[in-house]
Image (cartoon, rainbow, N blue to C red):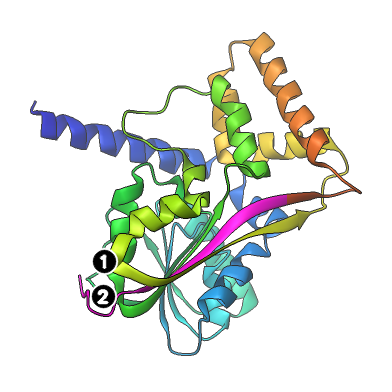
Amino acid sequence: MSDTADAREADRALKAKHRTMWALGDYPAVARQVVAALGPALVDACAVKTGDRVLDVAAGSGNASIPAALAGGEVVASDLTPELLAVGQREAEERGATLAWQEADAEALPFEDATFDTVMSCVGVMFAPHHQVAADELVRVCRPGGTIGLLSWTPEGFIGQMFATMKPYAPPPPPGAQPPPLWGQEKHVRELLGDRVTDVEGHRRTIRVDMFGGPEEFRDFFKAAYGPTIAVYRNLADDPERTAALDTALTDLAAGALRDGGMEWEYLLLTARKNGADAG
């Protein structure tokens, strides 16, 4: 088998692994109960209005897609994991939102160039393993003069620190895969988008999370509902000592972040306008 064929096969295996990981547990519960405010914040920053053609990349169960549709956008919610899209469809119907749902890889979007007025992603595209490839796709499908909006956890914020805490217990990442929280660094995202965009604005903000009564409650919720955390614990299934160590590490992390019954989770909200001279 050629090196190119080997690389393609490895990429297919990696994407299959990601698809399976995000179907574990109950990510829609995380989106609905813990971080529901993020989607509307991104939609507001992108100034989605009636008639705008909107693509939500790595949309999950529609945390940003549904608010964009309710704001009047003609929305396509795309995600690698069909189980999440199915939940999103049901939630959209319950909320009276009309939009399209399409299974798609953020690194190979099945859309023509310059199709959308707004291309956005809410803590989604940051988990695509090859950052430059994903960024190139975001730019490609956005029309000249259109908006690209990205909301990503920062490395220094709580979720970024959670990933750092889990890293020693996780299997090594595949060659070429980059850490998701890099998307929370404005410099990194500016480099990914390059001179293909103008009017870049990045703001660090926080979302207050006050649904957890204590650090153990946070840990147990994420062990049950959040795919990446579940995957790390599965990696330790035959090692009770390391499992206990991770339990302690996550509990300590949450204990250090809890203040007055809540936590502040930092994210980067970045918007940019695709260069009008670049139609590709």
Q: Which residues are magenta?
A: 265-280
Please indicate, yes or no, whether residue 132 appears anywhere in the rendered image: yes
Residue 150 x %, y % = 49, 62
User: Is residue 89 highlighted in magenta?
Assistant: no
Screen quadrant of the C terminus: bottom left
Figure quadrant of residue 87: bottom right
Please indicate, yes or no, whether residue 81 appears anywhere in the rendered image: no
Q: What amino acid is at disc 2? A: Ala
Q: What amino acid is at disc 1? A: Arg
Q: Is residue 61 above or below residue 244?
A: below
Say what secondary structure mark 2 lies in: loop
Q: Residue at x 40, y 38 (%)?
A: 178
Q: Nearer the viewer, residue 233 or 23?
A: 233
Q: Residue furthest left?
A: 2
Q: Is residue 183 above or below residue 227?
A: below
Which residue is identified by label 1? 140
Residue 253 x %, y % = 74, 32
- Measure how far apart labels 2 and 1 are at the Cα level: 6 Å
Describe residue 278's horizontal placement relative to residue 273 as left or right.
left
Q: Which mark is residue 65?
A: none
Which residue is identified by label 2? 114
Q: Nearer the viewer, residue 236 or 94?
A: 236
Describe residue 198's horizontal placement relative to residue 87 as left or right.
left
Q: Residue furthest bottom?
A: 50
